[in-house]
Amino acid sequence: MEIEKERQVLVVFPHPDDEAFGVSGTLAVHIKRGTPVTYACLTLGEMGRNLGNPPFATRESLPDIRKAELKEAAKAIGIKDLRMMGLRDKTVEFEDDQKMVKLVADLIEELKPSLIISFYPGFSVHPDHEATARAVVRAVRQLPDEERPKLHLVAFANNTETDLGPADIIHDVSDVFEHKMNAMRAHISQTAWMLKEMEKLLAVNDEETVQRVKFERFWLYDWAKDNVSDIED
């Protein structure tokens, strides 16, 4: 499917590397077309599971490592407006709901995006992913229908296609594949083991791996079935 020209793209994810695997090719295409892309990364992924064996980092040093990797990934994609929002990894789910919605709403008010890319609530597995997804939907829901940006959402729970159906949008990002691989490589502290196996499979054109890496899938939010509850006062 052809990637539509947008006025402004806003990307909201909780962790460094969330952007690399699922959407970096799509973002690289938008940037090549001259579309401004803002990436709001909520945390520095300081609770990332991989500290190395033997260890290359401690819990104290990992945030700086992941911050540098995030900047390098943004550079690989072409993102010039990278916002590090300062929340703590694995605590996004515990942040005040009103605060989370305001964070997203303020970005929308500033940037007036025509498209927001984030996770799909209920289908993004990790508690921080889910909290981010809910905040995005709630912030957009506050807007009049005619002012709402499009939502292109990433979903990967086991029941995604059963409950949501197949992806609404599939982008072939083969033309910017090296941009995507470089974004994934930038997050090497967390991706080294995964990339080694992935590159082996890509080298032999393993169909499942090619489909997973070279085609990026998004679901449109179904406002008719909106099941993200309102925030209680």
Image (tube, rainbow, N blue to C red):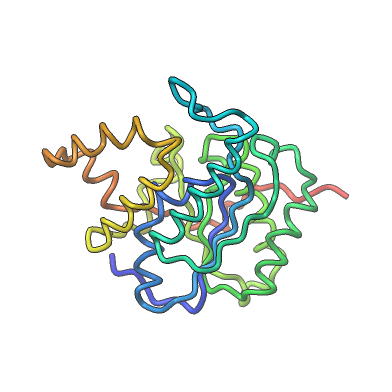
| Quadrant of res 110 | bottom right
Residue 203 located left or right of residue 162: left
Residue 137: x and y in percent read 63, 56
Residue 65: x and y in percent read 53, 42
Residue 93: x and y in percent read 69, 38
| Quadrant of res 92 | top right
Residue 153 located left or right of residue 47: left
* Quadrant position of the N terminus in the picture: bottom left
At horizontal 59% and vertical 53% (from top left) the residue drawn is: 41
Q: Residue furthest left?
A: 204
Say above or below: 194 vs 25: above
At horizontal 69% and vertical 70% (from top left) the residue drawn is: 143
Tell me how many marks there are: 0
Residue 96 located left or right of residue 170: right
Residue closest to the eye, 84 or 59: 59
At horizontal 39% and vertical 41% (from top left) the residue drawn is: 161
